[in-house]
Amino acid sequence: MIIDNLREIFLDVNPGVDVSIFNENSRLVEDLKLDSLSQLMVCMKMEEEFNIHFEKFITFKTVSEVLDWLKTQGIKD
């Protein structure tokens, strides 16, 4: 599932993140403690993992927003 792949990406970027709170409603900054550099790293890893390309930097607020955007790029569960 996409969310499982995302969980691994977030853990890779921020190994200290508490995976028990990782869900669609998790907020990237407040809950998962991602700063702007970490968010950029997540985007780069998503490009590799899902074979997509960001045309511009997108600021996501929640995991759900990331999932929704990936779906618009043709990524399916």
Image (cartoon, rainbow, N blue to C red):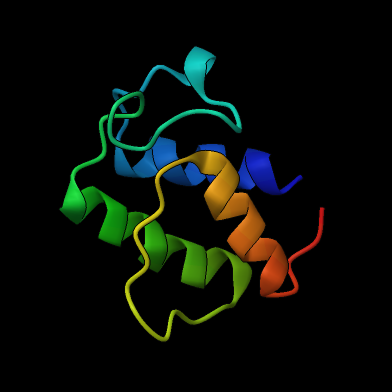
Percent coordinates x, y for residue 72 in the rendering: 69, 71
Q: Residue furthest right?
A: 77
Q: How many marks?
A: 0
Q: Is residue 35 left or right of residue 7?
A: left
Percent coordinates x, y for residue 6 in the rendering: 55, 45
Give the answer, above or below, for where 46 lies relative to 26.
below
- Pick whichever, 50 or 27, lies toward us: 27
Give the answer, above or below, for where 39 lies relative to 70.
above
Q: Is residue 26 left or right of residue 31?
A: right
Q: Quadrant of residue 3?
A: top right
Q: Identify which residue is drawn at 76% across, 45% down.
A: 1
Percent coordinates x, y for residue 55 in the rendering: 42, 86
Q: Identify which residue is drawn at 35% across, 23% down.
A: 31
Q: Residue furthest bottom?
A: 55
Percent coordinates x, y for residue 66 in the rendering: 54, 53
Q: Quadrant of residue 51?
A: bottom right
Q: Identify which residue is drawn at 49% across, 16% down.
A: 21
